[in-house]
């Protein structure tokens, strides 16, 4: 797979030289090309941003620079991969469609990805309008929080996609077993894991895992996965395929909900508000918040 990344901070992607992604690159499975966006500016100051039309805080990335950069990278890739080749364009933004394991699997099937991480308040919207007509273009979000720019989101996506490429993980571990992989344990979080020693600082490994009884171990792991998912991500259990649940699964869910109901009625009789709900909101969520100049990208 070829991956191009255009950024004003190409140094940000040094972690892709390390560990699993570094190995995938050495083996030629992952062919990553980093580009400095400022290489496509024409002014002495290498300007990539300007003030927003309509006013408001911050700066917006100029469309001409991104247009020249993306066109040049497409031409470079076509020279290497053939005139019919076109990349899938991926622009990280908090307003994008959610990046999920399903999207990672989809991207892992592509021969060529082009990432365009922005800084400041984002890229002039006409860039996505233009390339949305010429390339398969996705604006994606890796989660509901605001970063200082799209680079960290690109690192996340390249790693999530890169480990799915044939030959990267090796046969020792199947990507089909992942928490969010479509299949048997689909939509369940993984339960706890243990290794030697059998007792550490008084904490014991659950005895079933030492029993050698593979049937009981598989059942216990599924129960733990179900309980953990009920506790941490109940909305995932609500979306579970009911046909994928057996009688034992339903028992585990019922028992969990009974204990939840017991705790609910006990908490109600206490009638004390949680510390969380009394906490001061973060400064950025109080009225009149303004970022200091040093908090804004240069
Ligand atoms: C912030 C450009 N979904 C996470 C995410 C992705 C991108 C950005 N923030 C959060 C971002 C500033 C400028 C992109």
Image (cartoon, rainbow, N blue to C red):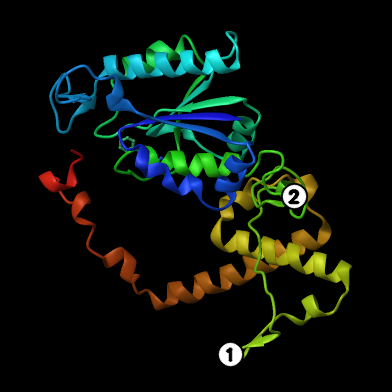
| In the depicted structure, whether residue 13 falls above or below residue 209 | above
Q: Nearer the viewer, residue 185 or 4?
A: 4
Return the mark for residue 201: 1
Inter-mark Cα distance, 1 to 2: 32 Å
Q: Residues within 10 Å of mark 1 (few under 14, many from 20)?
A: few
Decide: is 64 above or below 288. above
Asked if the beta carbon under badge 2 is closer than 8 A to the nearest atom of ligand 1, the reply is no
Q: Give how far across and how far down residue 201 sits, in percent.
A: 58, 90
Residue 288 visible: no
| Residue at image point 25% right, 32% down | 121
For residue 231, side relative to residue 98 (left or right)? right
Residue depicted at 76% across the width and 60% down the height: 249
Mark nearer the N terminus (1 vs 2): 2
In terms of depth relative to the viewer, which is nearer, 101 or 238? 101
What residue sits right under mark 2 in the picture?
A: 174
Which part of the image, by quadrant, shows the N terminus?
A: top right
Determine the secondary structure under disc 2: loop
> Does label 1 point to a residue whose CB lies under 8 Å from ligand 1?
no
């Amino acid at each position: 797979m070829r991956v191009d990344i255009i950024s004003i901070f190409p140094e940000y992607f040094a972690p892709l030289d390390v560990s699993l992604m570094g190995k995938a690159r050495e083996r030629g499975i992952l062919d990553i090309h980093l580009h400095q966006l400022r290489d496509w500016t024409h002014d002495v100051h290498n300007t990539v941003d300007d003030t927003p039309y309509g006013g408001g805080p911050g700066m917006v990335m100029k469309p001409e620079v991104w247009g020249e950069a993306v066109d040049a990278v497409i031409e470079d890739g076509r020279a290497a991969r053939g005139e019919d080749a076109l990349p899938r364009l991926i622009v990280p933004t908090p307003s994008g469609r959610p990046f999920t394991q399903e999207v990672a699997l989809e991207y892992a099937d592509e021969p060529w990805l082009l990432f365009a991480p922005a800084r400041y308040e984002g890229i002039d919207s006409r860039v996505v309008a233009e390339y949305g007509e010429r390339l398969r273009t996705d604006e994606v979000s890796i989660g509901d929080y605001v970063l200082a720019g799209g680079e960290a989101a690109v690192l996340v996506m390249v790693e999530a996609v890169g480990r799915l490429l044939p030959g990267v993980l090796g046969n020792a571990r199947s990507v089909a077993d992942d928490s969010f992989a479509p299949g048997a344990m689909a939509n369940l979080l993984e339960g706890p894991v243990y290794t030697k020693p059998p007792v550490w600082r008084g904490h014991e490994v659950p005895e079933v895992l030492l029993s050698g009884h593979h049937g009981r171990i598989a059942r216990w792991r599924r129960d733990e996965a179900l309980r953990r998912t009920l506790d941490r991500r109940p909305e995932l259990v609500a979306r579970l395929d009911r046909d994928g649940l057996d009688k034992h699964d339903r028992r585990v869910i019922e028992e969990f909900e009974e204990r939840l109901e017991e705790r609910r009625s006990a908490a109600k009789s206490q009638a004390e508000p949680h510390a969380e709900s009394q906490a001061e909101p973060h400064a950025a969520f109080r009225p009149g918040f303004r970022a200091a100049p040093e908090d804004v990208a240069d």
